[in-house]
Amino acid sequence: MRIAFGISVFLMLGLSLSAQGQAKPKAEASRSAALPAPLYSISFERKDAVAGLDASPAIKLPFQCTNDGTAFVDMVPVGAQMHPPAYAPPPLLLTSVSPTGHANTFPLDQTTEQLFDVREIDHYAAESEVIFLIKAAKESKPIKQTYTKEDGSQSEITKNTADRNVYIITFNRDGEHKKTIEIDSGFRIQNVGVFPSGDFLIFGYDEKDHSPKLAMLKSDGTSLRPLEIPKNDAPDSMFGTKDDPGKGGAVYIAASQFVPAGHSIIVVQNKTTFPLLEVNEGGAITAIPTKLPRGMKIDGLIASDQHLHARVTPADDGSIFEIGAHDGMVIRRFILSDGHSASGVACVHDGKFLSFEHGDGKLIPLIGTAEPAVSAEKQTKSSPPTN
């Protein structure tokens, strides 16, 4: 049985973070009358490249952002190599880019504690700190193992056989390492977040029955309390299947996302009909059912300082839906010009949409402005049924 984890690396082809093609105007016009009004179009303006930053075209999605408009980009370091066996991906380097174009990096190999074979599971950007959830070994116990290459030939690799532990690593916003905390939650953790109080929120699944688990940890990493997810607001199992596992199909772990929302954290259960879960610092959970058009599901939230902005699936034409943070109602719908994709939008700040493109080894910010896309008369036409 193969298990696929919900982590993807987006490769920017050519110069921009854009879709393969653009929606045809005729098709767009026919859709606009069938989706919630009002409809806006986002056009992007290129800014100066981020100074002093050599950028890789290989980036992990989704982006993260903080309320001051700083975007956090997790990318493969320039010149990094893939490693066997099975071409394991190289480690990623998180870089923050402020609205003024200032960049900071958060290197996991430059912490005060020596750890081996560090693998990032998740990270979370807060107003005053950036935290990482990692798995690593405290020591090195190397042995040589053989593996089969793509051409069928055999080769050797040196592997560390020491036990792996789970840690939370904390940096300040300038990229300075602050502390490393070993944690033991009692379940497999997928996501981590931090409240302004310093307490942590973790989300994952029970390794025995695969049921979703949500809990809070104290700032020192010790358990604060488990949180009970409201009944019917999360799946019974975090595992799903693609095709028949007995015939080579993969068992996958459902993807999830943490998004900051003031003093709360929103838990997004991607590509499901389950509601958003807002968790406050006291551990109270509020379910936010979303009123998207029938058949659509949230494929992730885009960090925003106003309301919620959601990417959806099926992808349709790459729309972004602005929805109410309390009632889940659709407020506005945005379409992106020039073939840009919703997956490439990092955040919404002061009403502007921030994206990036890659060119000549540099990361180039794009600032998107939204304008009404159709007449007021067309926007008042009836909307389709909602979920």
Image: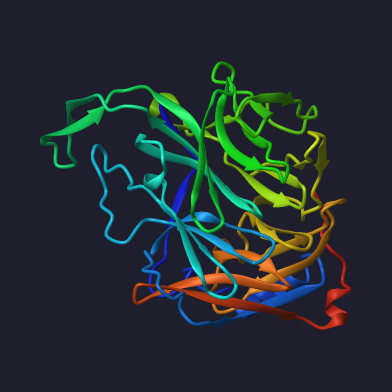
Q: Is residue 3 visible?
A: yes
Quadrant location of the N terminus in the rendered image? top left
Q: Position of residue 113 (x, y in %)?
A: 40, 36
**Residue 328 as seen in the image, left or right of residue 321:** right
Q: Position of residue 303 (x, y in %)?
A: 67, 58
Compared to residue 47, the image places residue 9 above or below, namely above
Q: Position of residue 213 (x, y in %)?
A: 65, 27
Question: Residue lying furthest top in this view?
Answer: 208
Compared to residue 87, the image places residue 100 above or below, namely below
Compared to residue 284, the image places residue 105 above or below, namely below
In the image shown, does 289 or 354 lie closer to the viewer? Answer: 354
**Image colouring:** rainbow
In the image shown, does 64 or 208 lie closer to the viewer? Answer: 64
Q: Residue at x 84, y 56 (%)?
A: 329
Q: Residue at x 84, y 63 (%)?
A: 383
Residue 71: quarter of image = bottom right
Q: Position of residue 333 (x, y in %)?
A: 75, 67
Q: Is residue 249 visible?
A: no
**Residue 232 as seen in the image, left or right of residue 248:** right
Compared to residue 76, the image places residue 281 above or below, namely above
Q: Residue at x 68, y 29 (%)?
A: 215
How many numbered dots are placed on residues in this image?
A: 0
In the image shown, does 111 or 63 lie closer to the viewer? Answer: 111
Residue 77: quarter of image = bottom left
